[in-house]
Amino acid sequence: MLVAIAGVGLFSARLARQQAPTPFQLFQRMMPVVRHPRCSNCHGGVDPTTAKHPGAPVTVEACVQCHDDDANPGWGLPAPEHFFVGKTDEEICSLFAEFAMKQGHARFIDNHLRKDELIVAAFKGLIGGARTPGAGNPPAPPADPPPIAQDAFVKLGQDWIDHGQGACEVLGTIRLVESVAAGDTFAIGGLDTYQDVKGTRTVSISVRDGKYYADIKTDYTITEIGVQKLVSPKTGRPCTITHTRKERQSGTTTGIASVTIKDTIFFADTKPPQTDYRIDVTLPPETTQKTETRTVNEACGLGIPFPPSSESQSFTWGRASFVIEGHVEDPKTDGRAGACDRAATNLEINTTKLEFDRSLPCFRFKNMGNSWYLGLMERTLPLTYHDVTRAIPYHLVARWNLKYVK
């Protein structure tokens, strides 16, 4: 009977662990407030022409009179990288995790969620901006407060910090996502070329049996259309020959990764017990399959046959590495958890310039979440076909949640 009771107890404990909310699920409990106009209006959704911003002027110059941090300290709008509008819950979680990591978890809760005067005003149902009653200003009309009281919202934020490590991933994981979506149009001689590149590479690392396993998935397509302008030898009229090339490369790889966490100091104002840290990651070799098809539509009546062609090829890539860098206020209470969500171009990534600037997302971004190049850049080889006068936009996301072990 004792054995049975013990077994039930172990099962119940295991079930409780399985049912515990993930860090991201804990964060999502805050979303009714984050998505509410009182928050989103300042974080990327300010529209002075709507009823949600009553009494505000409609010219940009007049807006700046209120939303100018120099003229009215404390009433400036957040920087664009902190905008919520148009972002998914996962992307907003990344912004919060990065902000909390830089601030320090305790300071994030106390200084921002609890004491920030704009947040306090929002929960009281007051409109944002420096236009206050008096001095010729009309009384400020009330605004709808968020659907959760501030004390309850602060409690949700504290739960996310205490039980979710202030992270967006479960404990013991790293997730890196690279994506590209670019279009080019350029001409070489009489050939007009249109190119579309879309792709995603996802790296998911988790601890299993004391080892770090990486699951890597790559999937991208390049569609290239070339239009050659000629004159038909039969009719003497303009005609075109259209060449279409479609390349897809995809693959899934699972293997053991090397993950090392190191204490370091990046900034002179980092004082004990604060510390900065870096996480060095080396991935297993990756394998992908490439399929390429080519077709030609000949509308000039030249009589030259252009049969469609296709080919497949396998690739094995070397062991790619990347670095994650972060900050904690107190190593005894803060885990190595954070996030980075940033748009960048190939010109920014392909550089050896080091940047130590707290105002930049992810601190020293040039070596953040990548190692001087992106794996997706190597696999898609966009520079081979790209118009070199334009930068290729990439979207980089890194999220991590690891315990620190020396």
Image: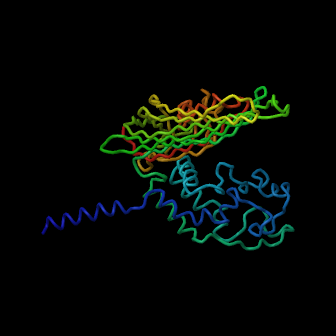
Q: Quadrant of the N terminus?
A: bottom left
Residue 235, image x, y percentages? 84, 33
The count of marks equals 0
- Residue pictured at 45% horizontal, 53% vertical: 165
Q: Nearer the viewer, residue 168 or 272?
A: 168
The answer to whether 28 appears left or right of 197 in the picture is left
Residue 399, image x, y percentages? 50, 46
Height in image: 124 above or below 74? below
Q: Nearer the viewer, residue 319 or 60?
A: 319
Residue 208, image x, y percentages? 33, 45
Height in image: 33 above or below 272? below
Q: Residue furthest left?
A: 1
Height in image: 232 above or below 336? above
- Residue pictured at 53% horizontal, 34% vertical: 375
Q: Is residue 288 visible?
A: yes
Q: Is residue 186 visible?
A: no
Q: Quadrant of the C terminus?
A: top left
The answer to whether 344 appears left or right of 17 in the picture is right
- Residue pictured at 39% horizontal, 45% vertical: 206
- Residue pictured at 45% horizontal, 49% vertical: 334
Residue 294, image x, y percentages? 61, 34
